[in-house]
Amino acid sequence: MQHAGMAEFDPVTGAAPVALPSMRTSTIRFKNLAALEQVAKSSAKGDRAFVYGRAGMDTHGALESIFCELEGAQHACLASSGMAAITLVFLSLLSSGDHVIIADCAYGPVRRLDHALLKRLDIQVSYCKGTVSAIAEHVRSNTKMLYVESPGSLLLEMLDMPALAQYANANNFILATDNTWGIGFYNVLSLGAHVSVVAGTKYVAGHSDLMLGAVMVNDPSLAKKLADTHYALGYSISADDAWLAIRGARTFPLRLQESAANGLKIAQWLAQQNIVDKVYFPALASDSGHAIWQRDCNGGSTGLLSIRLNCSHEAVRRFVDQLKLFGIGFSWGGFESLVQLVDPQAVAPHSYWNNSTQPLVRLYAGLECSDDLIADLEQAFSIIK
Ligand SMILES: *Cc1c(COP(=O)(O)O)cnc(C)c1O
């Protein structure tokens, strides 16, 4: 990954910049028509050829190859946000009259995409638990795609990706999964998913300074559908954002390791606190998804966890307000720790939540010292005990 997307040596000087410059240009000019035709020919062959800004330039190509490397993919399409990447998957691979089954643990705004757009396009949607048996009950004659997320948003519910893939293949469904959590260690494509969608906004960019998404596939026919729709819809991101994301990606493995180690220490500490009823963190032995995590995640994890608390909804607000190092805010994957008091309505549709009425808090452990983060949690709990 460290060498993916590096600049080629100049054939004349034999030199190359280590950091590829941000290629801020909307178009390329050619010396003559033969030169243009040469590039068009290699583009027709399927090579990544740069002729016009909308499809991206060298900086974008370099970032695409980093995403491919991280996901073990042959093809990547960039998008202006994780949500835009998700939208690209739905609009590229589904048509009016098709049906898609979405795991109920998927990222919340996917339901907004459904309400705002898919309904109007007559793309039908069912939601259910992300298991083969639950999905099988919702299949219709026009079902085309299963859209899942593992581990699920907010509660980190691990899904059985190989089983879902086997089921999808047996029924000719496309299996698309949001792999924002697992990019870099959870190889969903090699576990059988056909499409992986990632919010690069989180760990890959990693510094809370840009929005980015990407869609990765191996199958050439899926790649063509995605590329054609990507081009037709005019998806493009700025070269500077691509450049920043590449810079972030160079330290991604180290940042991930540190954040995940902090997450694990915090999860272990939280699991021992009386006020904490349940810790949702697949790398923790007590998590219900731990066995799947052990089998499928190659030891990788993140700094993202949620806790269900034994306290009132009034007390949890005081706890969150009392935290100093965990900033109140959405997102994760940056350098800074964050806390989110989860809206009960956001988690209510997740079958994994089992209709609990207890408060749920999502924590993201960033790159601060884990002892400091634990001390922060401790002092915030102390005021509500
Ligand atoms: C943040 C996030 C997204 C959306 O990414 P944006 O860049 O914010 O649009 C999608 N899926 C998951 C799991 C996320 O955490």
Image (cartoon, grey):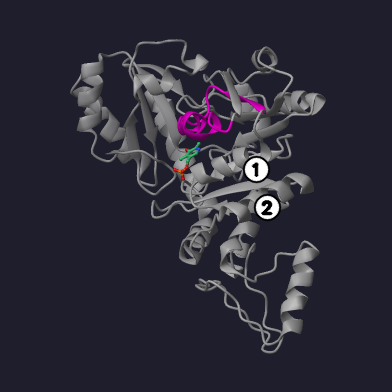
Q: Which residues are magenta?
A: 98-121
In the displayed structure, does residue 377 sit left or right of residue 54? left
Residue 278, relative to residue 236: is it above or below?
Answer: above
Q: Earlier in the sequence, mark 2 or mark 1?
A: 1
User: Of the numbered discs in the image, which one, if any, rests on residue 92?
Assistant: 1
- In reply to whether residue 103 is colored magenta, the answer given is yes
Q: Which quarter of the figure is the N terminus placed in?
A: bottom right
Q: Amino acid at mark 1?
A: Ser
State the CA–CA distance, disc 2 to disc 1. Answer: 8 Å
Residue 227, relative to residue 330: is it above or below?
Answer: below
- In reply to whether residue 144 is colored magenta, the answer given is no
The residue to which callout 2 is attached is 228
Marks 2 & 1, CB-CB < 8 Å contact: yes
Q: Which quarter of the figure is the C terminus placed in?
A: top left
Q: Amino acid at mark 2?
A: Asp
Residue 321 pos. (x, y %): 21, 31
Q: Quadrant of residue 168?
A: top right
